[in-house]
Amino acid sequence: MGWSTWYGFGCEYTAESIKAVADAIVASGMRDAGYTYVNIDDCWQLEERDSDGKIQVDPVFPDGIQGLANHVHARGLKLGLYTDRGTQTCAGRAGSEDHEAQDAATFAEWEIDYLKSDNCNSDAGRIEEQYRLMREELDTATSKTGRPIVYSICAWRFYDWAPSVGQLWRTGEDISADWAESNCGGVFDCMTTNAKYAAYAGPNGWNDPDNLQVGNGMSVDEQRTQFNLWAIMSAPLIAGNDLSAMSEETRQILTNKDVIEIDQDAFGLQGVPVRTEPDTHVEIWAKPLNGPGKRAVLLFNPDAGSHDITVRFADLGLGKSAVQLVDLWTKQDLGRFHDKYTVKNVASHASVMLRATGVEPEIPSGTAYLSDLTWIYAANASGPVERDRTAGKRGEADGGPIVLGDRAFEKGLGVAAPSAVLFRLGKACSRLTAQVGASGVIPEGASIVFRVLADDQLMYESARIFDGGNTETIDVDLTGKYRLKLVALVSDPAQNTVEAVWADARVQCH
Ligand code: GLA
């Protein structure tokens, strides 16, 4: 959580205006709400390096970056800086290409805490290599100073290597304070793209749909909806407005502690849409929270007219029992409900964020097929996860029979990778067995990989599967584990989703 110069200031800032924002973060209560990083984006550096190749700070920083770092650190905040992997930044200032080690050492010496690396003026063929190189040089530099630097990859789309390189990675192009599609990406676009990569998010690695646009001109409903969506997606909350001149309304949106708590939940799952109504387009989102029976629920109306929105508790992966609901904007305890809850007349682009407390589904017993159990979370790149058929990638039950190679399977889960499905085991199970493979075509040059995690620990990883005919057999020990996560990921330069199956997937339990 933090703030960035980019959307509020562009290149028009000075050490003084950034200090004023740092002071406002403290005075407005934003620091106490969790906003920590003060990020200087493009334009702090000069176009030319000095005769030793060292990066030069623009004279609008008379005390250098270190001077600003001191100001920010003295207030219990952290400082972020910006560079570019290419020869120049997007605004034409010096980039880090061929100066990675020198810049990493300089940044560490200035005591910065965060580095965003952009993608302008660069060689497309060197993208992974250059982002990795800067990560290594930051590690080298910070191992000497002992002050870690968060690494933010700004490559304008998702790359499957990014989660192993950065702590956060942009999933799309630049956002704007615009609901509808604009020149790059309106709020709705950035959200839709970001949602596709939910399976990759988790503690210490986050999909980044770009900065908040709260306070930058959208309607109040739209600002709250962006805040809700970013929070349920566990996205970085980086404010993009001028915090030294914000309205009380903006301040209140940015400091909604209940919604921030949803974003920061220790479980670290990226919430997902669990239902989209075909006629009205309204969406119901859910995110399991750290705590038994706890879910964040978002009822969201992206449509042009008002609609009633109903959440069915069966869609939340909860067991059958009453569910208690709290509205996180009105702070009202709404009471306990059975089966479903309806909010009347949700305005266009508005949303309602609820905290739901019910009971977890029963833990499995005996030999149980996963497709007969209730999952508590399912991220799927396209359409729903299917039981005993392939994913189909659109609506419910649109897939076909499960076939791997020339073998047909009656049981199994059909997913559209990247995908992650989470089950509760409650320490009752000892073994998972399954047969995995792609049920659809794997595009030329792409591959798919399957992972089994139990309590966030990697228990199994398949080889890269390049061919629809190839399968692997899984046999994983689950003794003593609470949660099982089945992950299927795709490596593909064209960002296709690929249909995959966990055929015959079953657990053996007491
Ligand atoms: C690119 C990035 C933005 C911002 C600008 C700065 O467009 O995607 O986030 O950093 O450059 O020039």
Image: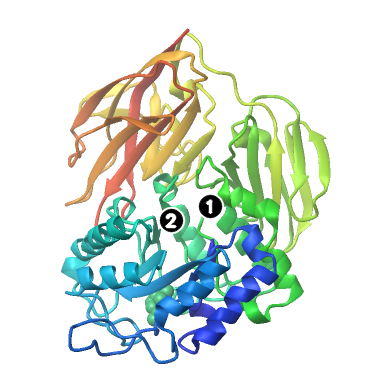
User: Which label's residue is closer to the chain start, 1 or 2?
Assistant: 2
**Left or right: 349 in relation to 39:** right
Quadrant hosting ligand 1:
bottom left
Name the residue nearer the viewer: 234 or 24: 24
**Left or right: 393 in relation to 98:** right
**Residue holding disc 1:** 233
Rate crowding at label 2 as few (under 14), some (14 to 19) or many (20 or more) other CA atoms within 10 Å. many
Residue 303 in view: no
Question: Where is residue 360 drawn, in percent x and y?
Answer: 62, 26
Residue 333 position (above or below residue 83): above
Q: CA distance from mark 1 to mark 2?
A: 8 Å
Question: Where is residue 70 drawn, in percent x and y?
Answer: 48, 73
**Residue holding disc 2:** 207
Circle 1 sits in a helix, a strand or a loop, which is it? loop
Question: Where is residue 264 drawn, in percent x and y?
Answer: 57, 50
Protein image colouring: rainbow
Q: Quadrant of the N terminus?
A: bottom right
Residue 315 position (above or below residue 100): above
Circle 2 sits in a helix, a strand or a loop, which is it? strand
Rate crowding at label 1 as few (under 14), some (14 to 19) or many (20 or more) other CA atoms within 10 Å. many
The answer to whether marks 1 and 2 mark residues whose Cβ atoms lie closer than 8 Å is yes
Q: Quadrant of residue 36?
A: bottom right
Question: Where is residue 39 drawn, in percent x and y?
Answer: 47, 72
Residue found at x 26% / y 73%: 103
Name the residue nearer the viewer: 424 or 27: 27
Q: Amino acid at mark 1?
A: Met
